[in-house]
Image (tube, grey):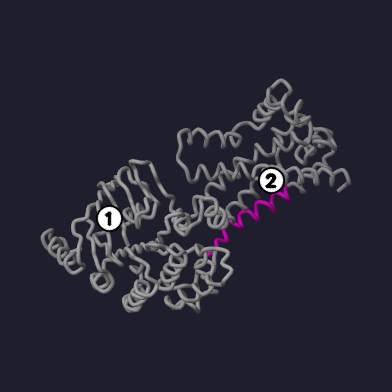
Amino acid sequence: MSGEEFQILGFTLGMAALAMVAILPPGLALAWLLARRTFPGKAVLETLVALPLVMPPVATGLFLLRLFGRRSALGRFVHDRLDVDVIFTWRGVLVAMAVMSLPLFVRSARVAFEEVPLRLEQIARTLGASPVRAFVTVTLPLAARGLTAGLLLAFARALGEFGATIVVAGNIPGRTQTLALAIYQLIQLGRDDAAVRLCLAAAGLAFVALFTSERLLRRRPS
Amino acid sequence: MRLALRGLRLPLPRFTLEVDLELHGRVAGLFGPSGAGKTSLLELIVGLRRPTQGSVHLAGRRLTDAAERSFVPPERRRIGYVPQDGALFPHLSVRRNLLYGAPHGDPTGEGKNRLAEIASVLEIESLLDRGIAGLSGGERQRVALGRALLAAPELLLLDEPFAGVDRPLRGRILPVLARIRDDLRVPMLYVSHEPEEILALCDEALRLERGRIVAHGAPAEVLASTTTSRAAAGSPS
């Protein structure tokens, strides 16, 4: 692989890793809410969280473009007050990856939380643990495997993100070009050899992430 | 113990739990058929459920009062609860299970002595560094009991803790419970199906049926009332 190809690979891995850091706090909170609480509008929230899974990614991208564009209140705030541009920058890549992979993480994390017996959390409370301590010392460690597996799955999804990214971040070589975007461009240019090399790299990464995720879910602690 | 349950009401799927009760004994035995609401009653006392009406007071301290909308969360009630399955934390060693609720930051080493004392009473000293997975049913229950005791509870609720333990072992656990009563002086509310356990351990007894206390008094009397009502109903269970 060429230096340029390594750069693309590194950039994609870095962005996907950052996206995982970004989705961890909201993902854990959403998954816990869906697993442990009943509240009005829960079904609507559930559906909204899952929506990016089934919507055309390009449509999600257009929605994000509008949300962070200069004509929206949020976009103006981010530009004027924080002096930050999201659209057509690496931050756009990050946002697209995060939004597209969040549903996968929330779904896995929700199951992981549901599998922790409520009884154990209740017993922790009777032993003097606050709800936060019970969560940190009982729920989180017992759900850790499922949470890690879910995060790897989301990471694999983020690595391959294409549709939303190309709308929000464009396809700017050296600045916003991820693995998937580069493969697309190489095919357009007829540079099939390079495209195949990147495809193999993408397949390898996805394989490792998915394989590890599955292994984590299979190997249950006794 | 001075446990007062006044006008307590909790709707359950098949009936409504309605209890008005004051307990003064060192150990009270609670028995009744499966599904009578025994576990729900314990959960109301320990604070895992909220009643729709009524109040719970322990030693003069208000724990729940539905009318006043006051509710002390379980972590501040100092009531130990040992459920049927023990509910040990599977990711922690026996020692860390035992110490989970123990008061922290004890500089005098008193906490360490307390662990040794309770482990000795429960005969689980040799298990301290083991994991949970390899423990037998009887060992699990003794660890669960020790974990509840190390949190220094003012009242201990035991929900048929030895139901899954074979009979010879149960015979050995009874003296252990008697030592908790006499040496550690922790008041207990003890749910059991075994009349001999109630007779040996308790100084008062209660019988719960379909959410209501149908007998309350000296263990021998309450047990006798049980036999009568069973015979009258013609049900052998």
Label 1 residue SS? loop
- Residue drawn at point x = 28 percent, y = 54 percent: B37
- Most extreme residue toward the left is B232
Q: Which mark is residue A26?
A: none
B128 horizontally vs B161: left or right: right
Where residue A25 appears, as percent x and y from the top left, is: 63, 44
Q: Chain of mark 1?
A: B
Q: Which residue is mark 1?
A: B35
B39 horizontally vs A176: left or right: left
- Most extreme residue toward the right is A3
B231 up-or-down from B8: above or below: below
Q: Amino acid at mark 2?
A: Val
Where residue B215 appears, as percent x and y from the top left, is: 18, 59
Residue B184 showing in the rendered view: yes
Which portion, as a residue range, is magenta? A203-222
Task: Verify whether residue A210 appears in magenta.
Answer: yes
Q: Which mark is residue A21?
A: 2
